[in-house]
Amino acid sequence: MAQRGSYAKGIAKREEILTTALDVIAREGYRGASVKELADAVGLSQAGLLHYFDSKDELFTEILRKRDDLDLETYRALPDTDPIRVFLRVMRHNAEVPGLVELYTRLAAEASDHAHPAHKFFIERRAAMHTLFDDMVDEGKAAGRYPKDLDTASFGTVVNAVADGLQTMWLQDPTIDMASEIERLLVALGVLTPERSITA
């Protein structure tokens, strides 16, 4: 019983670390989120913090996974279930948390190394996004909302690549409105009409 209780406490502490780290990075930025700062925020030593993770890279990978889980939970609760509009709302929200965007873009680049702890996370994330967009496009084409000749397979790849590229550009030039740029692309592709935009 004691062992089971210790395990549950460990899981709870790990969740506390990830939730606190999200707040710290969103508030202080990626550069203000060293292991020491994150450890201080949850009342642990650096060694104590890393007891819950295999490495700093694994910690940051799990922070991104937690961010995705919270975003999904938040936007699923909204009455608007249109995946395109939800995706655009997430992009608009990202502009409010530059530290997390910087963490995402840095880890995405580093994860090109197959041995990096974030490599599997990004592969799985991309596959999940593809499934979301593929199902959405096929349903939209069948309902006549999207052009019949829209390539389902390439659509998800292109939209995700545009989103990732825009986030990198936005870190260099915060005047870029990421959600609006993606909206323009979707309107040009015939996937989105002005009436279905997030500003409508």
Image: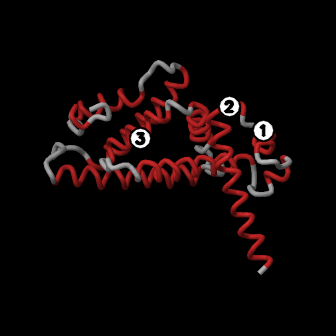
Of tags 3 and 2, the one toward the viewer is 2
Q: Are the two marked residues, 3 and 2, in contact with CB atoms closer than 8 angstroms? A: no
Front residue (pair 3, 35): 3
Q: Which residue is mark 2?
A: 28
**In the drawing, does residue 190 fall left or right of residue 198?**
left
Label drawn at residue 182: none
Which sits earlier in the primary sequence, circle 1 or circle 2? Answer: 2
Q: Which residue is mark 1?
A: 37
Q: Residues within 10 Å of mark 2 (few under 14, many from 20)?
A: some
Residue at mark 3 = 160
Q: Is residue 132 above or below residue 182?
A: below
Residue at the image point whose x is 52% and y is 53% from the top: 69
Quadrant assignment for the N terminus: bottom right
Query: Which label's residue is closer to the chain start, 3 or 2?
Result: 2
Foreground of the two, 116 or 186: 186
Amino acid marked by disc 3: Asn
Label 2: which secondary element: helix
135 lies left or right of 13: left
Image position, residue 109 (x, y; %): 58, 38
Distance CA(mark 1)–CA(mark 2): 10 Å
Q: Mark 1–mark 2 contact, CB under 8 Å?
A: yes
- Secondary structure type for disc 1: helix
Q: Quarter of the image holding residue 197?
A: top left
- The residue lying furthest to the bottom in this view is 1
Q: CA distance from mark 3 to mark 2?
A: 27 Å
Q: Residue at x 33, y 50 (%)?
A: 79
Residue 89 lies left or right of residue 42; in this view the side is left
Badge 1: residue crowd in 10 Å (few <14, some 14–19, many ≥20): some
Residue at 29% from the left image edge and 28% from the top image edge: 184
